[in-house]
Amino acid sequence: EIVMTQSPATLSVSPGERATLSCRASQSVSSNLAWYQQKPGRAPRLLIYGASTRATGIPARFSGSGSGTEFTLTVSSLQSEDFALYYCQQYNNWPPYTFGQGTKLEIK
Amino acid sequence: QVQLVESGGGVVQPGRSLRLSCAASGFTFSYYGMHWVRQAPGKGLEWVAIISYDGSDKYYADSVKGRFTISRDTSKNTLFLQMNSLRAEDTAVYYCAKDLYNFGSGNWGPGDYWGQGTLVTVSS
């Protein structure tokens, strides 16, 4: 099973600034990596797939990069609605699909 | 627009069974694989199972294999999760999700649309 490790666990950033979230896979997942956003009491929302492709309706301030074992989600110019939990997920070697433990993006 | 609505959650005693449903609309249900993903209270996301567009292929997480069964009824645009021999550690919100890719792509991917979830509580 591929283990996904996200860092940091919590990231404090001021509105308008840039946030950079990391995700590492225990072995290569090629570019088969997705990012989700989840707000309290809500379902996850797909942000990025294929490591760098934005899902339908996702603002351009969200961008993804990386391949193999190291991935990054960048949120440029943070808006109030961007403060949430973020998960990465690999879909290269499955079953099982595996998620990272999440990064909480909070207001500084 | 794509809509997924789960139902069937509730409180159940350990060892008992429960069947979850996910009603799909707004897309051609028979073209897409479907997932179940769960989230224990205050915890992260755990993938549970996936079924292919035509129901011929099914895969499970080790934690539920042999106890849970995923199925679909294309005539009713509905996805199911039959959960048997339930344990306290199965307590979670269960989400259904539509796979990003349709059958024509030959690929399996992440869930691009998710339902609102249904809570299953296993407790005596």
Image: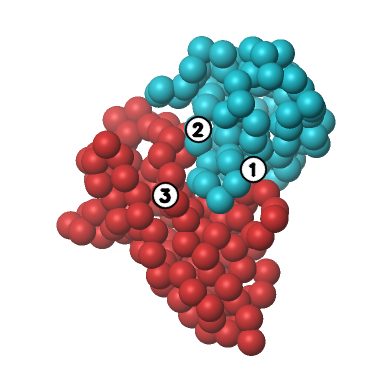
Residue B86's image quarter? bottom right
Q: Are marks 2 and 1 in contact (CB under 8 Å)?
A: no
Identify the residue under disc 2.
Answer: A46
Q: Which chain is red?
A: B
**Are dots 3 and 2 in contact, CB under 8 Å?**
no
Residue located at (58% from left, 41% from top): A39
Q: Amino acid at mark 3?
A: Gly
Amino acid under label 2?
Answer: Leu
Horizontal arrangement in the rendering, residue A7 relative to residue B40 (left or right): right
Colour displayed for chain A in the image of the structure: cyan
Give the quadrant of the C terminus of chain B. bottom right
Q: Residue at x 41, y 22 (%)?
A: A57
Residue at (35% x, 49% y) in the render: B4
Up-down relation of residue A85 to residue A55 (above or below): below
Q: Secondary structure at mark 3?
A: loop
Q: Residues within 10 Å of mark 1 (few under 14, many from 20)?
A: many
Residue A92 visible within the image: no
Identify which amino acid the numbered label 1 is placed on.
Thr
Q: Which chain is indicated by disc 2?
A: A
Report in which chain the residue with disc 1 lies.
Answer: A
Left or right, residue A83 beside residue B19: right
Residue located beneath label 3 in the image = B115
Q: Which mark is residue A98?
A: 1
CA distance separating discs 3 and 2: 12 Å
Mark nearer the viewer, 1 or 3: 3
- Residue B83 placed where, x, y %? 49, 72
**Residue A40: % across, % down:** 60, 46
